[in-house]
Amino acid sequence: MPVPPAPWENWSGLVRVLPRSTEVPEDPAAVRRAVVAAAEAGRRVKMVGSGHSFTEVAVADDVLLSPALLSGVVAVDRDAMTVTALAGTRLEDLNTTLEGLGLTLHNMGDIAEQTLAGAISTGTHGTGGVWSSLSAQVVGLDHVDGRGEALHCSADENPDVLAAARLGLGALGVITTVTFRVEPLFVLEAHEEVLGWDEAQARLDEIVAHHHHVDGYWFPGTDRVQVKRNDRLADPLEDARPLPRWRRVVEDEVLANTAFGAMTGLGARVPAAVPALNRFAAAALSTRTYSDVPHRVFTTHRRVVFREMEYAVPREVGLEALREVRRLIERRRWRIGFPVELRFTPADDLPLSASSGRESTYLAFHTPRGADHTAYFAGVEEVLRGYDGRPHWGKLHGRSADDLAPAYPRWAEFAALRDRLDPDRVFTNAYLRRVLGD
């Protein structure tokens, strides 16, 4: 269904584009028709998501497809323990539906506003577990390639396409449905505490080894590291001990969003105040323990707009890399108003995954919307490249195809599949030309 084109902007405000035309396909067949029409006219087409990527990976400056009508669960297979949903379904809606069915994803990232296709295509991940990324939990998908051919992809049909398109940057085609491996709903217990820098450095490896899901937050300019441990319980659902509503509102909305947003805004305007603000924020953190269904533990609502870069380095050098980044921050006297986040993932088998073939430590760096991120991100990126770092595809980075290809052992496999599925580059844009080449 064609609609008048309107400017499209991503969540961070860094990307804004006016497409030549916009369509809102009402079903997968309409997606196929739109791709065929674009290919025959020599045009380019992209389906956008919710705009939570910081890069220009989803920019559609020619034909923009909106996923607004491609939402909802379409199949539940309790024997295979899979659930299939349309690609434009938001994660928060999928999570709610799954909870009502007594099901859940194994793992997820820390926000749930993304569309399913956008989240898997850029490598959205959590921490710990057997499968950390959403992409690694995908066991099937439907997909329209650059010739307009609709492909069903599973372990039995087009398995090579499934292997790559689960994290394909939108470069192999338009995903129309996604099938996830799911599990019976369980209880996840969260324990949050603050450690000193030296204690965190000494204990984090042990903590990660003994808990299911661990992430950490170091506040630059301080010696305080918040550590979150999330563990699966054998307790029945009725024995969960969620945070009282008042405490969730006060701590996760008023403090983590409203107050933190005011502090980062002040720090962006008055950089000299940032160290004191970070010390205050870190000192205000307290120990808390609660338990709930997974999506209410893993995910949070983020109302403070920021810029982000994230890199994965081999697991064994993660803390060493963090120490070098700290030395760089202190040497340059940068005033960084956001904590540095650490997450830890098992290896996976996705060709373009930052964790492909290796256990990884992810280090994420943020700045407020009003602050200049360029020098900070460029300096940290140089450090992490020295540790064989790989960038998160949906986060800011300065890499290009020439120096990305050697970092991914299966790069040639992905490139060959792209040549086969989209030989005329119907799905390309400036970002994909930079990171994947022509």
Image (cartoon, rainbow, N blue to C red):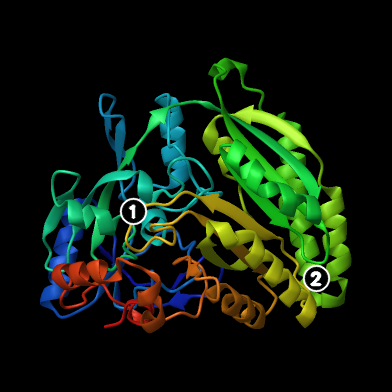
Within 10 Å of disc 1 (Cα), the crowding (few <14, some 14-19, many 20+) is some
Q: What residue sits right under mark 2 in the picture? A: 267
Q: Is residue 228 above or below residue 189?
A: below
Side (left or right) of 255 relative to 14 = right
The first of marks 2 and 1 along the sequence is 2
What residue does disc 1 label? 349
Quadrant assignment for the N terminus:
bottom left
Question: At 55% from the left edge and 71% from the top edge, which residue is drawn?
Answer: 387
Q: Is residue 270 visible?
A: no
Q: Residue at x 65, y 39 (%)?
A: 229
Q: Which amino acid, mark 2? A: Gly
* CB within 8 Å, label 2 to label 1: no
> Residue 275: which quarter of the image?
bottom right
Residue 73 in the image: state x and y as whole percent: 32, 38
Q: In the image shown, does 291 or 267 lie closer to the viewer? A: 291
Q: Position of residue 338 (x, y in %)?
A: 72, 64
* Disc 2 from disc 1: Cα separation: 41 Å
Residue drawn at point x = 85 percent, y = 49 percent? 284
Q: Is 301 in front, or is 382?
A: 382
Q: Amino acid at mark 1?
A: Asp
Q: Position of residue 216 (x, y in %)?
A: 67, 51
The label number, if any, that marks residue 305 in the structure image: none
Vertically, is 403 above or below 300?
below
